[in-house]
C-alpha cells in the first residue's frame, strides 16, 4: 500500500476520535485511500484503492475507466469532493462513493503531479512535464491557468500556500539526476521573493507543507536516490527561510524514501515513506512511530488520503 515510490498524503480527521490517524496503538474509524500509479510512475495497480484503518484492503475506490494512473489527491473544502489528478490528463471530482461527479476537459501534456486547494478556492496542480503549476476552477468548467512560468524550476517537488497568499515551491532532484535542491517563494503577484531563501546544504526536498505555526516543512532525502541517503523532516522559518530544526525517525520507523507530508489534528505531522506512514508530534519533534499493516502489497503509491 505505502510502497517504493509514494508521493504525498492528505488526512481528514475522524471528528469523533481526533487522535486517530495511522498509528497502530490508536483506535480509528476511517477509510484510507491510496493512489497506485502505473507506467513510468511505478508498477502499481493504476487505481485508487481503499483500505481500512487497520490496513486491510477494502477494494477499488472509484472503479471508473476515466480514472487512469491516479496521482495527487485533494479535498474540495466547499462540497467535500475528492479531487483526483488522473494520468489521462484530466482532473476528476469524486463523491464519497467514488462516483465521478465532474471532470475537466482533457489537457494535452498536463502530466499532473500533486495538488492543493489555494486560498482563492481554486485547485492547483503541479505539472511534471512543464515544471510549473496550473490552477483550475473548483467547478472544473474552464481551462486551467498557468500561474508560474513554465520550467520555473528544474524539477518541482511539492508546493503549498503560506501567509499572505505566498506560494512556496520545492525544487528537488528528478529521477535522472536533473534539478537542484532549493525552496522558492512567490508573492501574491506570483513574482519570486528574492529576500526569502533557504540555505541548507543537507536539503533535498521531496514534498512541502505549511505547519500550524506558519513555518515551511519538507521531507528530505539527501543525497537523493543514494543508498546511504539521510532521510529527515526539515523545518524552515516562514520569515526568512533559516533552518529551525530537523526531525528524525525513531521507534522502529525505517523512513526510507520519504515523500508526501500532511498535518493532522493535534499538531501531528504524517509522512508517506516506503512501506509505511510515519507520524511525528510536531510540537515536541518526537517521532511517534509508523503504521505498516497496509504496506504488504508492495506496490508503488502516489498519494494517500483518509476519510472519516
Image (cartoon, rainbow, N blue to C red):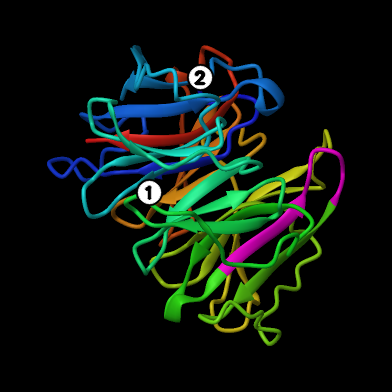
Q: Which quarter of the rendering shows the C terminus?
A: top left
Is residue 220 positioned above or below 108 on the image?
Answer: below
- Secondary structure at numbered mark 1: loop
Residue position marked by numbered label 1 in the rendering: 140
Mark 2 closeness class: few <14, some 14–19, many ≥20 residues within 10 Å: many
Report how far apart the C-alphas of labels 2 and 1 lie in the structure: 33 Å
Q: Is residue 119 above or below residue 84?
A: below
Q: Quadrant of residue 179?
A: bottom right
Mark 1, Cα crowd under 10 Å, few <14 / some 14-19 / many 20+, is some
Q: Position of residue 257 (x, y in %)?
A: 67, 36
- At x 34% / y 21%, what residue is drawn? 61
Magenta residue span: 168-178
**Which label's residue is closer to the chain start, 2 or 1?**
1
Quarter of the rendering containing residue 245: bottom right
Q: Residue furthest right?
A: 177
For the point 41% across and 62% down, which residue is it?
283
Q: Is residue 303 left or right of residue 202?
A: left
Residue 133 in percent (x, y) is at: 59, 58
Residue 140 counted in the magenta span: no
Q: Would residue 165 appear left or right of 21 to someone viewing this image?
A: right
As for residue 175 lying within the magenta part, the answer is yes
Image side of residue 135 versus residue 5, left or right: left
In the rendered image, the vertical position of residue 292 relative to residue 290, given as above or below: above
Q: Which mark is residue 295?
A: 2
Q: Is residue 19 visible?
A: yes
Q: Horizontal placement of 238 versus 178: left or right?
A: left
Amino acid at each position: 500500500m505505502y510502497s517504493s515510490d509514494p508521493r504525498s498524503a492528505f488526512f481528514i480527521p475522524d471528528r469523533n476520535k481526533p487522535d486517530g490517524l495511522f498509528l497502530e496503538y490508536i483506535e480509528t474509524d476511517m477509510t484510507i485511500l491510496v493512489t497506485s500509479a502505473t507506467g513510468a510512475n511505478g508498477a502499481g495497480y493504476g487505481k485508487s484503492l481503499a483500505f481500512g484503518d487497520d490496513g486491510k484492503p477494502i477494494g477499488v475506490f472509484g472503479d471508473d475507466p476515466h480514472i487512469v494512473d491516479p496521482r495527487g489527491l485533494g479535498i474540495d473544502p466547499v462540497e467535500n469532493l475528492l479531487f483526483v489528478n488522473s494520468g489521462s490528463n484530466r482532473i476528476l471530482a469524486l463523491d464519497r462513493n467514488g462516483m465521478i461527479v465532474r471532470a475537466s476537459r482533457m489537457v494535452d501534456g498536463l502530466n499532473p503531479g500533486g495538488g492543493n486547494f489555494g486560498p482563492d478556492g481554486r485547485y492547483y496542480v503541479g505539472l511534471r512535464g512543464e515544471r510549473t503549476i496550473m490552477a483550475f476552477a473548483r467547478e472544473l468548467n474552464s481551462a486551467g491557468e498557468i500561474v508560474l512560468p513554465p520550467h520555473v524550476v528544474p524539477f518541482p517537488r511539492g508546493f503549498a500556500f503560506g501567509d499572505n497568499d505566498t506560494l512556496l515551491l520545492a525544487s528537488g532532484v528528478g529521477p535522472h539526476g536533473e534539478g537542484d535542491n532549493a525552496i522558492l517563494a512567490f508573492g501574491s503577484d506570483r513574482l519570486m521573493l528574492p529576500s526569502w531563501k533557504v540555505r541548507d546544504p543537507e536539503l533535498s526536498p521531496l514534498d512541502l507543507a505549511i505547519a500550524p505555526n506558519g513555518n515551511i516543512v519538507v521531507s528530505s532525502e539527501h543525497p537523493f536516490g543514494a543508498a546511504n541517503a539521510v532521510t529527515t523532516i526539515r523545518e524552515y522559518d516562514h520569515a526568512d527561510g533559516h533552518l529551525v530544526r530537523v526531525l528524525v525517525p525513531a521507534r522502529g520507523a525505517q523512513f526510507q524514501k520519504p515523500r508526501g507530508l500532511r498535518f493532522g489534528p493535534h499538531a501531528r505531522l504524517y509522512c508517506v515513506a516506503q512501506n509505511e506512514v510515519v507520524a511525528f508530534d510536531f510540537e515536541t519533534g518526537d517521532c511517534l512511530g509508523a503504521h505498516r499493516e497496509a504496506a504488504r502489497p508492495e506496490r508503488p503509491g502516489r498519494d494517500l488520503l483518509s476519510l472519516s
